[in-house]
Image: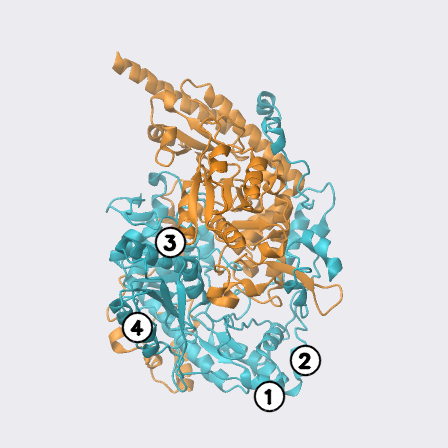
Chain colours: A cyan, B orange
Amino acid sequence: MAKDKTNRVRKFHQAKWDEPVIFELDTKGERGIKVPEAEKEIQEQIGDGVSALPENMRRKDPPALPEISQMRVLKHFLRLSQHCLGADLNIDIGQGTCTMKYSPKINEHLVRMPEASELHPWQDESTVQGALEIIYKTDCFLREISGLDQFTFQPGGGSAAILCMASIVHKYFELKGEPGRDEIITTIFSHPSDAAAAAVKGYKIITLYQNEDGLPELEALKKALSERTAGLFITNPEDTGIFNPKIDEFTKLIHEAGGLCGYDQANANGILGITRAREADFDMCFFNLHKTFSSPHGCGGPGLGALGVKKELRDYLPVPLVEYSGKSYSVNFDLPNTIGKMRGFFGVFPAVLRAYAWIMSLGAEGLKEAARVAVLNNNYVLKKIRELRGASAPYAEGRHRIEQVRYSWQKLKEETGVSTEDVICRMADFGFHLWTSHHPFVVPEPFTIEPTESYSKEELDEYIAGLEKVVEEAYEDPEKVKNAPHNSVVHKIDQSTLDDPEKWAITWRAYLKKSKNW
Amino acid sequence: MEKKNKTIHPYIPNSVPEIQAKMMEYLGIKDIEELYADIPQHLRFKGEMNLADAIPSEYELKRHVEGILSKNLSCNNHISFLGGGCWQHYVPAICDEINQRSEFLTAYAGEPYEDHGRFQVLFEYESLMAELLDMDVVNVPTYDWCQAAGTAIRMAGRITGRREILVSDTVSPERLAAIRNYCQPVMNVILVKHDPKNGVMDLEDLESKSSAETAGVYFENPSFLGFIEHQGDEISRIVHTHDAICVVGVDPVSLGIIRPPSQYGADIVCGDIQGLGVHMFFGGGLGGFIASRDEEKYVMEYPSRLFGITKTAVDGEYGFGDVAYERTSFAEREEGKEFVGTHAALWGITAAVYLSLLGPNGMKELNTTILQKSRYLMKNLSEIEGVRAPYFNSAHFKEFVVDFNGTGKTVQDINASLLSKKIFGGKSLRSEFPELGESALFCVTEIHTKKDLDTATQAIREIVEAVNTQDFREDG
């Protein structure tokens, strides 16, 4: 390959098809697919079917969808796919907090089996024993991994799992007769949804900020506690990759104040088999199956936030739960204190199936090895980045991190004018993906890297070489970095049209009406 | 030095001891355990996770999982009439071809630069849905219809500054449960009655419950029970006189022929895209959409990502990016609108492919076929003594309630007999709509052949008649 052995970057160029928007492919009369027609006898007996509709409910003008032949539709979307990198193609360690690990292909084959893909959720229990078995056994695995007692697979993602925790907390205090508990405490390095999804349930949010070690202070927590405290929603390790060693003191204080503790383990990749929600005395926790448990991210879902609780909270879970009698699997809708439903049916079954297969492939030792290697990879990259000019890893100086690190390009910015945003754009030129971080930018010019267990040492070195290359350019030729990307699909986009109500166009039809204002 | 019994896992390249040794040497550590120094011993899990024995070989893993899945009976080799929020439609081959592409399947939250394709394809999804819905704004998909309805209602609450939402009592019970949870404690859900004969909304009840406290009304069309609500214009007129918002849940599949809610006064429209090219996946194929007019007061209340089209530094080049990102919880945490995260983007991509393939004519033909086939089954079932379909005296699209009350048989028993004939009968409505007695919700789509429908009719006839004979004997 073109990349030389000194680990310099590839001579990459992203595909660039200059592909039109789908509506521009419209050719009147073309067809992408034929759908079945009703058989002749049906047509003879029933007529056109349409005249049975009330006149005022018939659509006057057909939807203005494009008319395109089949192969052109295929080609269009294949080309768009080539304008996208995906973890299967790049060394996807630059999307910290998201655990961009390998999603095994065999699991894709399994979810595409008709016995998984062609199941209706309301089939009789006796006809879906296999699906219920997968759900039940994955639940049991997650109980072992967390130390908690019962899981639900209803939440469609991590944020939905947080909403589910908030809903349980709300119901719990409603039934306990303590409706005055209207505050949820979180930390600034916990996911934004720990604050946002809790606020949807009407909670006032108290956010604890970090000390010089990057951790929230016990004293700050004590000050935040009152008879209004409903609970704590917290990540650990936080998005900095720093583990809060006093986490059990946090949960103890919350419990003493009468609140419940929810553990955001969306990303638990560094601590599988090492430490659990149980040891830190959390009442609830959730795992994103599309992160730690390998279900692919799908450009942003479908995912799954598997939520577990201690047995005392089991009756608050959304319905249904899957149970096992020793002989057969069944569905239980009868939970006395249930919060009801988070989403339709049983949750994202393919994500559960993939998580099951991933856990089965690795076993307990393999899970631990995945965690240990994820941590090894992270600390390897951490040391490499600390050696990079212009980069730093704020907080916890000299200490190791768990599965990820929030870094800063502040020095690079000060010395060269090149920002994180610029580095991101230039990294794209070498086939790499880098992400800033969740807002607010407490760490200035942030970027977050999470190597996971999926990438080899050589790949980690290649990614570092990419960063080195961009840093080198930043100091030698900053304009080159600021004007990037150069080898990607597109060039710097005009953000102003996206924020102006007179100009923004969220659909093609809006674009046709509004682009004259651009 | 290689430790004995050390497993080198194919998913974990750096499980190779020599590589680990090199990395540890670079870090100046002797054991990976040292990297966990921050986790105190008392928080360590000292036991072993009691998981099943690992199956590291891919072939054996495949056999193992296939063995479990083979205990399922699928709609692939049974005739299924189950619907009600998850539907069996034909999935064009190209839909799966595209959503299995590594580039889409394994991307996540990239930037408009290296993931330009993701932004364009989801912009196209929004745009194609916008044509179907005849509205100018559509979000990047949320989890499912439950979430879409919950958010649409909360948007109505924020836009009006009011706390009451009037909800038709014929909406999906699952959805109603999710809406109730999502609204509490910020909004109150008040149910509006339906006409027991034709199912449609009782407008007098709607009038009487509408007030200056009303944020809006929410109903579904076609309804969960399958009938078409033909009073959309009147319903929206009533709520609009109270300066409230009309929110309608719709099955997008129906909009090839049926009038879209925006054309009878809906301000926010929501629903599910599973029917647009996504397999059922035991309910895992759901994806929710929300749509509205392109007005700032609406757009700024969406919690979802909204991908827009823009210019780039190069003349004539399309760029894509987030519209009004500052409204989201990613930007503003608890000050943002509700929350955003990982939802159902891959199904949005799939629906874009589906709508591009079908086009206006495909959607129209699909709708025609469904209307004809569902009416055919209703007609044939009604010819069986004691069976009546549809239960409600209204037009229907693909779903309808079959009334078995006249057969003296329970839906549970009928379905058990049907199962032995490789047919999944309609969902029993016994617990959720007890007033309908022994009734079942049937769903007929383009995938049902005449032969399937005739087979099912004959099977039901036999079951019902056999039972009636037996009852007669017992009575005698």
Q: Amino acid at mark 3?
A: Phe
Label 3 marks which chain's residue?
A: A
Position in image of residue A26 (x %, y %): 72, 47
Of the residues shown, which amino acid type is indicated by label 4? Phe
- Are the residues flagged by discs 2 and 1 in contact, CB closer than 8 Å? no
Q: Are marks 3 and 1 in contact (CB under 8 Å)?
A: no
Distance from the alpha carbon under mark 3 to that under mark 2: 47 Å
- Residue position marked by numbered label 4 in the rendering: A250
Q: Earlier in the sequence, mark 3 or mark 2?
A: 3
N-term mark: 3 or 1: 3
Front-most of residues A83 and A365:
A83
Are labels 2 and 4 assigned to the same chain? yes
Q: Earlier in the sequence, mark 2 or mark 4?
A: 4
The reply to whether dot 2 and dot 4 touch (C-beta < 8 Å) is no
The amino acid beneath tag 1 is Glu
Q: Which residue is mark 3?
A: A153
For the residues carrying marks 2 and 4, which lies nearer the camera in this image?
A: 4
In the structure shown, which secondary structural element does the residue marked by tag 1 occupy? helix
Please, which chain is the residue tagged with disc 1 on? A
On screen, residue B209 versus residue A251, left or right, reads right
Badge 3 marks a residue whose secondary structure is loop
Circle 4: element type: helix
Q: Earlier in the sequence, mark 2 or mark 1?
A: 1
Q: Quadrant of residue B234?
A: top right
Question: Which label was assigned to residue A480?
Answer: 2
Q: CA distance from mark 1 to mark 4?
A: 40 Å
